Image (cartoon, rainbow, N blue to C red):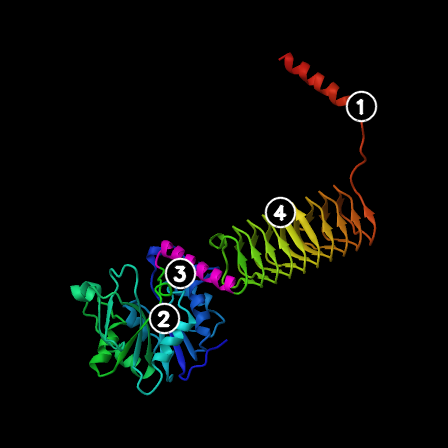
């Protein structure tokens, strides 16, 4: 649901960096957290504010980002060469031509920033006495090399200083600059064009606009936010840390909504996981993208679920794998070591043990015996298996698709079914059982004598 703000909003997301510490051919901001690329997390949070314009500044591996953003209402600005964060924002000037309002400046590798915090930044600039710039700051456990924000008791910024240039007294300040900010559009690009590059790196730094604004008689304010929201991802270790924070946040949200997790720290969720009230999730369950479960669902330990819709009152696992396209009707059961893919199980249907159901439709209250498989692939094409309501499939059966098992039909254990079975019929395809009295004993004697002669 979009948040109502008085001022028009635009956003500039910086994603031009090389991300060398990730040691990856994939662009840094496309690495996933909770099954969604970091950049898409940020855009999804931003959408809550209904911005009029969104600009992503790209540079290294620009082609990857352009493909990822294809079809979205996002302008792309190219920074080449990359001459610092201030220079990067300046590349968005054309895309923001004619815009009047508040510009949020965000980083593509800071994916956990919430819409609520973005809203606070925007609101800080609303009103006749509002400052021209609002800077988001935080207090990390180890301030170390972070730039410091020196502010008065009202939150007005007096000075921003890099750690290497700070005095001992300034280093004692624990309020650190995140680099994220909101700026009135009427001042942004004028200030950026005043930024110089007289520094060791020869780059144009975005935070310099704060002191330039102060020198021009404009006010800048600081807002303090959670350090967890401002975690930046520049390495695989930081990616793992961000994933852990995301998982902790999502588990908390779901439990607050009425989901029980026996061991929350062992459950892994995707960005879009939906679990209804009174769901119970046992330890070591992994939810891939696209899972939606109704109410009173029991998901037993060590199950892996992705792209599946699970109805009210279903039971899944333990050790079940539900792959994309799986739909379980109310009260259906999928048990231990059962795998489903593009399989629709009607209400009350059961596949409790050691079964593979692929490209299948299983009617209400049908029972699939242990070891049953749908043979859905001939090496070239996939085919469907349809099992009618109330059908009973005996253990260790192979259903060779395309094939239909009628409603109420029974397939005898160990059968290989290659033709349709009518409603209420019994179908058995195993060979007749034969017997040879005493054969086993004679076989053992013969083989033992042969072994003794060696």
Viewer-side label of 3, 1:
1
The residue where tag 3 is placed is: 27
Q: Is residue 6 magenta?
A: no
The residue where tag 1 is placed is: 437
Q: Earlier in the sequence, mark 2 or mark 1?
A: 2
The residue where tag 2 is placed is: 106
Towards the viewer: 199 or 293:
293
Q: What segment is highlighted magenta in the picture?
A: 234-256
Viewer-side label of 1, 4:
4
Which element is circle 3 on? loop
Q: Residue furthest bottom?
A: 128
Prevalent SS, magenta region: helix
Looking at the rendering, which quadrant does residue 238 occupy?
bottom left
Report the disc number at residue 336: 4
Total labels: the figure holds: 4
Distance from the alpha carbon under mark 3 to that under mark 4: 39 Å
Q: Badge 2 local density, few (<14 within 10 Å), some, or many (20+)? A: many
Which element is circle 4 on? strand
The vertical placement of 297 against 69, above or below, is above
Q: Earlier in the sequence, mark 1 or mark 4?
A: 4
């Amino acid at each position: 649901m979009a948040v109502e703000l008085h001022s028009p909003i635009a956003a500039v997301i910086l994603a031009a960096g090389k991300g060398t510490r990730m040691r990856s051919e994939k662009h840094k901001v496309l690495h996933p957290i909770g099954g969604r690329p970091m950049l898409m997390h940020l855009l999804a949070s931003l959408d809550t504010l209904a911005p009029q314009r969104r600009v992503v500044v790209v540079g290294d591996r620009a082609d990857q980002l352009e493909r990822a953003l294809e079809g979205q209402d996002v302008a792309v600005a190219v920074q080449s060469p990359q001459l610092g964060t201030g220079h990067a924002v300046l590349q968005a000037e054309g895309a923001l031509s004619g815009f009047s309002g508040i510009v949020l400046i965000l980083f593509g590798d800071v994916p956990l920033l919430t819409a609520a915090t973005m809203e606070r930044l925007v609101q800080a600039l609303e009103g006749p006495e509002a400052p021209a710039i609002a800077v988001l700051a935080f207090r990390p456990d180890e301030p170390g090399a972070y730039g410091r924000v020196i502010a008065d008791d009202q939150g007005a910024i007096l000075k921003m200083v890099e750690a290497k240039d700070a005095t001992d007294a300034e280093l004692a300040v624990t309020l650190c600059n995140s680099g994220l900010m909101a700026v009135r559009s009427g001042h942004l690009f004028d200030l950026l064009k005043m930024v110089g590059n007289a520094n060791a790196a020869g780059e144009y730094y975005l935070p310099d606009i704060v002191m330039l604004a102060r020198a021009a008689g404009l006010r800048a304010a600081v807002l303090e936010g959670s350090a967890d929201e401002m975690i930046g991802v520049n390495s695989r270790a930081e990616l793992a840390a961000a994933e852990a924070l995301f998982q902790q946040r999502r588990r908390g949200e779901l439990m607050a909504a009425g989901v029980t997790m026996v061991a929350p720290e062992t459950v892994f969720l995707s960005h879009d996981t939906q679990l209804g009230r009174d769901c119970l999730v046992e330890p070591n369950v992994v939810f891939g993208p696209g899972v939606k479960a109704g109410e009173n669902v029991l998901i037993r330990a060590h199950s892996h679920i992705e792209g599946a819709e699970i109805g009210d009152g279903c039971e899944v696992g333990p050790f079940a794998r539900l792959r994309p396209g799986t739909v379980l009707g109310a009260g259906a059961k999928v048990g231990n070591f059962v795998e489903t893919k593009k399989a629709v199980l009607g209400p009350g249907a059961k596949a409790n043990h050691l079964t593979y159901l692929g490209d299948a439709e299983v009617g209400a209250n049908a029972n699939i015996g242990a070891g049953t498989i749908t043979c859905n692939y001939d090496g070239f094409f996939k085919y469907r298996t349809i099992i009618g309501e109330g059908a009973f499939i005996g253990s260790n059966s192979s259903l060779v698709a395309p094939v239909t098992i009628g409603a109420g039909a029974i397939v005898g254990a160990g059968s290989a079914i290659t033709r349709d079975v009518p409603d209420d019929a019994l179908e058995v395809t195993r060979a007749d059982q034969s017997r040879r009295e005493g054969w086993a004993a004679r076989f053992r004697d013969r083989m033992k004598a042969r072994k003794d002669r060696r």
